[in-house]
Amino acid sequence: MPDFPRTSRNRVRRSPKRGHYDRQTIYAILDEALICHVAFVQPGDPSPQPFAIPTLHARRGDELLLHGATTSRLMRHLACGEEICVAVTLVDGLVLAKTVFNHSVNYRSVVLFGKGYPIESRAEKLAALQAFTEKILPGRWQDARLPNAKELKATAVVALQIEEASAKVRSGPPKDEGEDAGFPTWAGVIPFAQIALAPIPAPYSSPEVETPDYVKAYIRDLNHLHKLGE
Ligand SMILES: Cc1cc2nc3c(=O)[nH]c(=O)nc-3n(C[C@H](O)[C@H](O)[C@H](O)COP(=O)(O)OP(=O)(O)OC[C@H]3O[C@@H](n4cnc5c(N)ncnc54)[C@H](O)[C@@H]3O)c2cc1C
């Protein structure tokens, strides 16, 4: 799979060595992240106001699947084919340097650009919702009641074709140089991880219905998620 081209839109300027344009790096970050932020400006707005809206996402090949209420401004805007920018961020740790100036965070982030199109036929919508659900919680689609006609009508599904993208990755220890490295304070990294805690059954859950293994053992299984997105 070819890298994304470097353009004036997606080229990482500050710390360019942290920039990545290959699909493998970019897609691994998209697949691991549960949420993204979608940024857009509505055309025809007399005083253009940018909005950034957090939402769930799932990748399917070179597309990002997004869903929501048909009445939501976000979904209506996504479906109209205007340019959109999406950001995804994974925070891997706090980086404590000896100087305040050199403090940082370890992270993996993606910024991507593309245009959305609505997925409208019943069969395609169900297939997209299945891919979306399985991406977020593998095993759930087959266990839950599937959407009925009314629910499908109330749900908009949009695929965003990824035109350009970049990743930026910072990892490793802090960087203090010269006499700062000897400053008498602790320096290092506080690593972060996204973990799921023990599941809590709904108040109306029957004790006879066992908690499924995929709920008990929920983790963001990265290899599995990546395969689903291929
Ligand atoms: C968790 C986190 C915390 C951060 N904290 C700070 C902070 O406190 N201060 C600060 O100045 N910067 C911070 N950054 C870095 C910030 O995201 C930008 O990279 C930075 O503002 C430099 O942008 P630029 O001027 O090089 O590029 P811009 O001109 O702003 O962007 C040009 C293009 O580069 C690409 N790009 C830029 N940044 C990223 C990115 N992070 N991920 C993927 N693609 C990117 C995009 O395609 C973008 O369109 C943080 C990043 C993360 C993920």
Image (cartoon, rainbow, N blue to C red):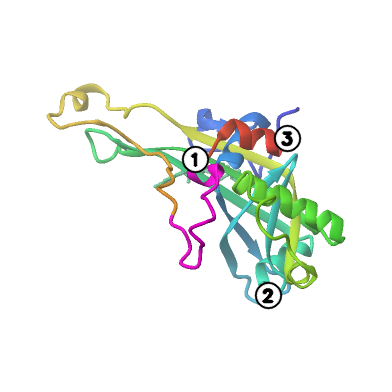
Give the number of callouts.
3
- Of 41 and 196, the residue lying toward us: 196
Where on the picture, by quarter, is residue 10? Answer: top right
Residue lying at the far front in this picture: please name it.
208
Label disc, if present, on residue 230 of the rendered structure: 3
Which quadrant: the N terminus? Answer: top right
Query: Is ligand 1 less than 8 Å from the beta carbon at label 3?
Result: no
Q: What amino acid does circle 3 point to? A: Glu
**Residue 120 placed where, x, y %?**
84, 62
Q: How crowded is mark 2: few (under 14 residues within 10 Å), some or many (20 or more)?
A: few
Left or right of 112 on screen, residue 119: right
Q: What amino acid does circle 2 point to? A: Asp
Instruction: Specify the segment rendered in magenta.
Output: 200-216
Query: Is ligand 1 less than 8 Å from the beta carbon at label 2?
Result: no
- Of 83 and 201, the residue lying toward us: 201
Q: Is mark 1 on a helix, strand or loop?
A: loop
* Residue 95 inside the magenta-drawn segment: no
Which residue position holds label 1?
217
Q: Residue visible at 60% across and 34% down? A: 28
Left or right of 66 on screen, residue 153: right
Which residue position holds label 2?
45
Q: Distance between the residues labelled 1 and 3?
A: 23 Å
Label 1 vs 3, first from the N-terminus: 1
Residue lying at the far left in this picture: please name it.
184
